[in-house]
Image (cartoon, helix red, strand yellow):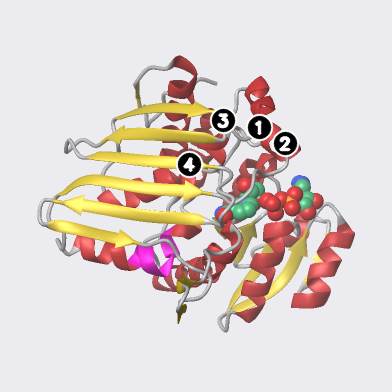
Amino acid sequence: MQRFALLGAGFIGAVHAENLAAHPDVDLVFVYDIDLTRAAALADRFGGKATTNPADVFDATAVDAVFIASSTDTHAEHLRAAADAGLAVVCEKPIAPTLHEAERVVEHVEASGVFAMVDFNRRFDRDHVELKRVVDAGGVGPVELVQMSSRGPTLPPVEYLRVSGGQLRDQTVHFFDLCRWITGEDPVTVSVTGSALVDPTIAEFGDVDTSVAVLRLPSGGIVQIDSVRRTGYGYDERIEVMGADGLIESRRQPAANVALYSNAGITTSPLHKGWFERVQPTYAAALSAFVDALAAGGPSPASLRDGLNAQAIAEAATASLASGKTERIAYEGSAAP
Ligand SMILES: NC(=O)c1ccc[n+]([C@@H]2O[C@H](COP(=O)([O-])OP(=O)(O)OC[C@H]3O[C@@H](n4cnc5c(N)ncnc54)[C@H](O)[C@@H]3O)[C@@H](O)[C@H]2O)c1
């Protein structure tokens, strides 16, 4: 049994609390939040003791691992505290609001030697896992072209977008990670174009709701990622990998895999209503992968370095959106303070 403390009892904290409570090898011992009412609400439903005292959770005599699901601006501080206490840690993305801070904290955690994972949950999507298995086995031959779509059904509230860091850091970052994970390569350059088509007011703070990023791999392979905030027809995520010997696709997922055949034609189920409906199973799968890897002594299914490198791509992509130029991606020790 691994004793877990959950940090952060907001929207995603509730998802993780349910998964922690359901996992047979996990004992949820603390739910920690600066807001005791929120912590208590989750502890009442899923177990553990509600606390607002960090000394309770960063204590290796009572806890084996912490799950950081608190607000983005707290991740770095909590990662450092977990490392200093010798606790294993899984952290929601991003590692820190700025690349420079993320670099410093990853160095700190790596130096401590604690087992760590960033919660890049889309790596645990059942169909994406199968796609990667086939690509790794050489099923499409050397990868030449990857196309990914990340298209949400409705524009999130403008108040959320204003502090999100922008579409490329907030939404596309998961797909920058998938690009590295699927191809096994760190892209060298990125070029982005984007527009605020759904709500032009978000352009006032430099954001876009519709964008295309083109990344070049060291092998010469090309990756294209389109990110859209409002489809109007449901959550539309797909990945296509074309190689020298064939193509594999992780398809758009309908909410149910049925079709109605009638005189009027063929009607199939719509896509999932929202991103959460599509990705919900990936959170439990990511947690299981963390627990299994921790028990086995590694490797991490998604290391903090993976989190850092995806953030580095998002930074270069954001710079490209602003400059209109192709930007070189700088991975190590080069982020401005
Ligand atoms: N991987 C994913 O798909 C995914 C999805 C949603 C959110 N997230 C990430 O999860 C994090 C939380 O997002 P959310 O939507 O749940 O936000 P939220 O605002 O609903 O919840 C954040 C919680 O953190 C608490 N908190 C703030 N400061 C704290 C502190 N110092 N110590 C402990 N708790 C503190 C708040 O009181 C709140 O309950 C964000 O970093 C977000 O980027 C990731």
Residue at numbered disc 3:
208
In the figure, is residue 135 to the left or right of 202? left
Real-space Cα distance between discs 1 and 2? 9 Å
- The residue type indicated by label 2 comes to Val
Residue 199: which disc? 1
* Amino acid tagged 4: Ser
Q: For disc 3, does the CB lie below 8 Å from ligand 1?
A: no
Amino acid identity at mark 3: Val
Query: In the image, which residues are magenta?
Result: 123-129
What is the crowding at mark 2: few (fewer than 14 residues within 10 Å), some, or many (at least 20)?
few
Task: Give percent across and percent down for residue 203.
Answer: 63, 23
- The kind of residue on which mark 1 rests is Asp
Query: Element at badge 1?
Result: loop
- The mark that comes first in sequence, 1 or 2, is 2
Front one among 232 and 117? 232
Give me the disc on residue 227. Answer: 4
Residue 118 appears anywhere in the view: no
Is residue 280 depicted above or below 175 in this figure? below
Cα gap from disc 4 to disc 3, whole angstroms? 10 Å
